């Protein structure tokens, strides 16, 4: 069994293998009630929540800072015209249409010029649902074309999760603590309504369901006139120390395709605002100084003809006085960006292959079984905000032999354990995942939690491991089989 921890991008739909192993930084979440159009950036379109005994679907919108949680009824997801791409000349992609036929694709790996929607169960706690999982279903699709959601295996082949052309509903069992992305393919331009539903069984046997929830998509240009755009500046704190970093963000409501801005400030009682040279993006970052105290900042949004579409209200910068020191002293100010740092998951490149001992018959004589150890996995969190994390693993493709035989990744299970901690860390090992046996177990064919750190307890480097257990039907063909374990940290 091989392991891999880095996503490999694809220039085209099947140019290479896609491994879902992104690093996601989760900022604090607020709520928003205004109607928006989301067309670029990351969003957990299907975000599963369980509160007060009620299962619900939300939209986690990371296209704004700070991120917000929205009601699906308030969101239109736009698949921009630039998402158009031909169906590959590969029989495995025939479910999308004839080779060369145009489709509109939101890819599994992020393209900053397109929307990057996914699904998310990271807010769900372990021990609440049977099997620590919920069932996510695409119940119905209405619109001018067909809709498909598919991942890709390590060889670039499609792993179809939802496909409207061959009939719905389609269902997918999703473990808690899962954050996933897929390719979203639409076969025609126009407006669509996708009905998603989440169902689960509580550990006491109670069934809970969201019922069908409508999600609105527009493929191509919006059919109505450009909406009136409101623009505001987010990110200004109440006060800064001299030398601190100031990061301002321009936020459109609703979000449009326009991305050309100019930033302005007005300082020292000036009557007019002055343009800030070279600042044409949605973010403006600078250093606070006493000379800038009391300056006002605005941002304006422009169309392709350099006409102003929207302008923000001013925000003011307030910079504290440095403390008074004796005449011979010096003041030294150090600034640390609280958002700096990263979350990574890694394995030793020289110690990443697991070779299980030859399988032996179980005591009952009804299974082939073998046990071994996962090679150590290191999760390193250097983020200043210390938001916590979860590490998971999945084998997305069957075990295969050189002779072409195969068996399901679900026949391999694990028992996670914590091997080492940094000072101040508090890490919990994931639950045991048993190999699939008729009627029970799920194995590592689905995403399984390896370990997690709660808010405020994850910073540093933690080492995780797991005992592995393979349990196969006795009719499995003899041979040497391999598969790839994909590790993710969010």
Image (cartoon, rainbow, N blue to C red):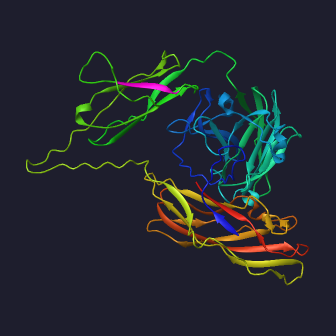
- Image location (x, y in percent) of residue 92: 82, 48
Q: Where, by quadrant of the figure, is residue 273 drawn?
A: top left
**Could you say which is closer to the camera, residue 481 or residue 325?**
481
Q: Quadrant of the C terminus?
A: bottom right
Q: Point out the residue furthest to the bottom here.
A: 363
Q: Residue at x 56, y 64 (%)?
A: 346
All told, the count of numbered labels is 0
- Image location (x, y in percent) of residue 287: 31, 39
Q: Residue at x 38, y 47 (%)?
A: 337
- In this rendering, the answer to whether 402 lies above or below 282 is below
Q: Is residue 211 visible?
A: no
Q: Quadrant of the N terminus?
A: bottom right
In magenta, the rendered stretch is 259-264
Q: Magenta stretch mostly in which secondary structure?
A: strand
- Image location (x, y in percent) of residue 37: 62, 28
Q: Where, by quadrant of the figure, is residue 248 drawn?
A: top left
**Could you say which is closer to the camera, residue 83 or residue 412?**
83
- Asked if the stretch drawn in magenta spans residue 461, the answer is no
- In this rendering, the answer to whether 146 lies above or below 149 is above
In the rendered view, does 378 fall on the left or right side of 479? Answer: left
In the rendered view, does 365 fall on the left or right side of 310? Answer: right
Q: Point out the residue furthest to the right here.
A: 475
- In this rendering, the answer to whether 276 lies above or below 66 is above
Q: Residue at x 80, y 56 (%)?
A: 205
- Image location (x, y in percent) of residue 100: 79, 35
**Could you say which is closer to the camera, residue 197 or residue 78?**
78
In the rendered view, does 336 fall on the left or right side of 257? Answer: left
């Amino acid at each position: 069994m091989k392991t891999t921890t880095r996503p490999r991008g694809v220039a085209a739909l099947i140019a290479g293998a896609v491994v879902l192993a992104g690093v996601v930084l989760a900022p604090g979440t607020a709520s928003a009630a205004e109607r928006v159009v989301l067309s670029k950036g990351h969003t957990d379109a299907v975000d599963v929540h369980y509160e007060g005994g009620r299962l619900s679907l939300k939209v986690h919108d990371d296209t704004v800072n700070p991120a917000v949680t929205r009601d699906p009824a308030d969101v239109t997801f736009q698949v921009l015209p630039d998402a158009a791409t031909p169906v590959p000349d590969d029989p495995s992609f025939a479910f999308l249409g004839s080779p060369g036929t145009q489709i509109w694709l939101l890819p599994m790996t992020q393209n900053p010029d397109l929307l990057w929607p996914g699904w998310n169960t990271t807010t769900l706690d372990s021990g609440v649902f049977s099997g620590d999982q919920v069932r996510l279903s695409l119940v119905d699709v209405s619109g001018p074309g067909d809709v498909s959601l598919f991942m890709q295996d390590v060889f670039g082949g499609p792993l179809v999760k939802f496909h409207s052309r061959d009939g719905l509903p389609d269902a997918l069992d999703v473990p808690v603590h899962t954050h996933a992305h897929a390719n979203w393919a639409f076969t025609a331009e126009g407006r669509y309504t996708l009905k998603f539903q989440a169902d689960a069984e509580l550990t006491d046997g109670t069934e809970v369901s969201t019922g069908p929830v409508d999600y609105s998509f527009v493929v191509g240009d919006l059919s109505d006139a450009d909406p009136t755009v409101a623009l505001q500046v987010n990110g200004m704190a109440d006060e800064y120390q001299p030398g601190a970093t100031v990061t301002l963000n321009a936020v459109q409501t609703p979000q449009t395709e326009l991305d050309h801005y100019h930033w302005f400030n007005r300082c020292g009682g000036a009557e007019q605002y002055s343009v800030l040279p070279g600042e044409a993006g949605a973010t403006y970052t600078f250093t606070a100084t006493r000379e800038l105290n009391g300056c006002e900042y605005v941002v304006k949004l422009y169309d392709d003809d350099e006409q102003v579409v929207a302008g923000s209200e001013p925000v003011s910068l307030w910079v504290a006085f440095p403390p008074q020191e004796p005449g011979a002293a010096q003041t030294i100010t150090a600034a640390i960006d609280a958002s700096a740092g990263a979350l990574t998951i890694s394995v030793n490149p020289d110690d990443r292959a697991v070779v299980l001992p030859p399988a032996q018959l179980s005591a009952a004589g009804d299974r082939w079984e073998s046990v071994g150890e996962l090679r150590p996995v290191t999760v390193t969190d250097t983020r200043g905000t210390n938001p916590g994390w979860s590490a998971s693993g999945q084998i997305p493709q069957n075990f295969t032999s050189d002779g072409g035989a195969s068996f399901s990744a679900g026949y391999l299970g694990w028992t996670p354990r914590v091997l080492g901690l940094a000072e101040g860390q508090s890490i919990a090992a994931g639950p045991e995942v048993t190999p699939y046996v008729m009627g029970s177990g799920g194995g590592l064919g689905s995403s399984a939690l390896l370990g997690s750190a709660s808010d405020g307890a994850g910073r540093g480097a933690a080492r995780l491991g797991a005992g592995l257990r393979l349990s196969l039907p006795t009719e499995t063909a003899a041979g040497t089989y391999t598969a790839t374990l994909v590790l993710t940290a969010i």
